[in-house]
Amino acid sequence: MSEMKVLIVDDEVEFAAALAERLELRDIVAETVNNGKDAMSTILVRPPDVVILDLKMPDLSGLEVLHGIKAHDPSIEVIMLTGHGDMDSAIESLKLGASDFINKPVRFEALLLALERAKQKIAMGCQLKDYTKNLEQKIEERTLELRQTQEELMASERLATIGETVAGLAHYIKNILTGLRGGMYMVDVGLTKEKPRMQQDGWGMVRRNIEKVSCLVLDLLKYSKERMPEPTVCSPNRIVLEGVELMREKAGQHGVKLCTDLDPNLEEAFLDQDGINDVLLNLISNAIDACLYDTNTAKEWEVKVKTRLKGDAGSGEVILFQVIDNGAGMTDEVKAKLFSRFFSTKAGCGTGLGLLITQKIVQEQGGEVSFESEVGQGTTFSVRFNRYMHMS
Ligand SMILES: Nc1ncnc2c1ncn2[C@@H]1O[C@H](COP(=O)(O)OP(=O)(O)OP(=O)(O)O)[C@@H](O)[C@H]1O
Ligand SMILES: [Mg+2]
C-alpha cells in the first residue's frame, strides 16, 4: 500500500483537526468530519483505508457508524476512540468488526501503532485477495487443461477402438474369403474336370463360409445395438431345456454328453427369455468347443447346465445359471483376454464376439457373469440374475 488514507470522525472539531495535522506530518493523508452522517457520505465518495472513529457523538453513535461502514465495505479498517468506562461499548465495537480501540485522551504513539497494525491487516487482506484470485485462475486453467486432455484421450480411445474393430473384422473376413475362394476353386475344377465329388465338397465350403458371414453380421448387430430387455414371467428351467435341445446336435457330432441339473424349486421368474437364451447358447457352444479342443481324448467329455435359486424372498432371490464343462480349460493368458473384441483361439472358426455379447446381455439385465477355469480340467461359467428383474 503506497499512501494510507485516514478519515477522522470526531465531534470535537479541534481535536480532529489537530490529529489530522499530526498525521499529515507523518505522510498520512487525513480528512476530518465531525458527525456520523458526514462520515457515511464521505466514505461513499472518497473511501478511506482506515477510519478513526469516536465512540461518543451526539447524532449517530460511533457503534452505528461502525455498523454502517462495515455494511458498506468490510475491508475498511476502523479504530475506535473510547472514553474511560466505555469498556462494554469497546468490546461491542470489536464484535462489530473494529480492528482496535484506543482510550481518550489519545496517546499519539498508541494511535500510530494501531494505524500500523491496520495497515498490515489491509496489506494482508490485499495479498489474500490476490492469492485467491490467482488460485481461482489457476484452477480454471488446470480444469481447462484437464478437460482438453480428457477430450483428446477420449478421441484417441475412440480411434483406437475403431482401429481395433476394423483390424479384427478385416482379419476375420479375410479368413472367410480364403475359405470362399478355396470352395469356388474346387467347384471350378470339379466342373471342368467333371469331378462331382470335388464340386460337392467345394460347394460345402462355400456354404459354410456364407454361414460364417451371416453369423458375423448377426453377432455384430447384437453387439453394437442397444437392446432394451423385455422381461416376462417365464420358467428359467424351461429356457435351459430349450437351449440344450438346440445344442444337442452339435454336442452329439463331437461326442460330448450334454446334460442338465435343474433346481426343482425354481418355477418361475421375471426375466428376458430371448436374452437368456442367447447367453446360454453362447456359453454351451463355447463349452462344447472346449471339449473339442481338449487333447485328452481319454476323457468322457461332458457339458452340464445347472440352475439354482439362491438367497430368500427377504434378502432378494437370485437365479444362478451355470455352464460346466470338463474340456480344455483356459490358460491365464486366455483368461485375461476373454472379454476382448475378436479374441478367439478358434483359428478363424469363431468371431470372438460370443462372450462380449453374453456380457452385454447379462449387464443389460442387471446380472453378473463370472468364470472359473483350470487348464486340462475344464471351465465353469456362472451367470446371476435377480429372480425378478427390476426395470429402471
Ligand atoms: N468354456 C470354455 N473353455 C475354454 N475356453 C473358453 C471357454 N469359453 C470361452 N473360451 C475362450 O474364450 C475365447 C472367446 O470366446 P468367445 O465366445 O468370445 O469367442 P469364440 O467362441 O472364439 O467365437 P464366437 O464369437 O463364435 O463365439 C474362445 O476363443 C476360447 O479361447
Ligand atoms: Mg463363443
Image: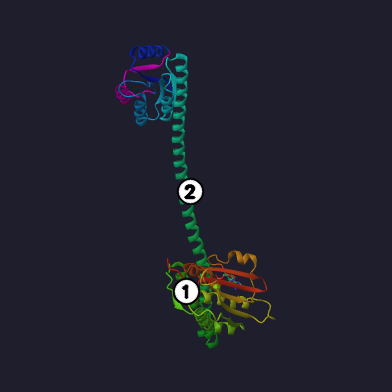
Q: Secondary structure at mark 2?
A: helix
Nearer the N terminus, badge 1 or badge 2?
2
Q: Position of residue 140 (x, y in %)?
A: 44, 42
Q: Which residue is mark 2?
A: 149
- The dot on residue 93 is none
Regarding residue 190, the answer to whether it shows in the image is yes
Q: Residue at x 31, y 26 (%)?
A: 44
Please name the amino acid that badge 2 sits on: Thr
Tell me the quarter of the picture where residue 288 sits.
bottom right
Q: Residue at x 43, y 26 (%)?
A: 88
- The dot on residue 275 is 1
Mark 1 burial class by Cα count in 10 Å: few <14, some 14-19, many 20+: many
Q: Is residue 55 above or below residue 313?
A: above
Which of the two residues, 151 or 276, is positioned nearer the viewer here? 276
In the picture, measured across the screen, residue 17 lies left or right of residue 179, that is left
In magenta, the rendered stretch is: 26-48
Magenta-colored stretch includes residue 28:
yes
Which of the two residues, 104 or 132, is positioned nearer the viewer here? 104
Q: Residue at x 39, y 13 (%)?
A: 19
Mark 2 burial class by Cα count in 10 Å: few <14, some 14-19, many 20+: few
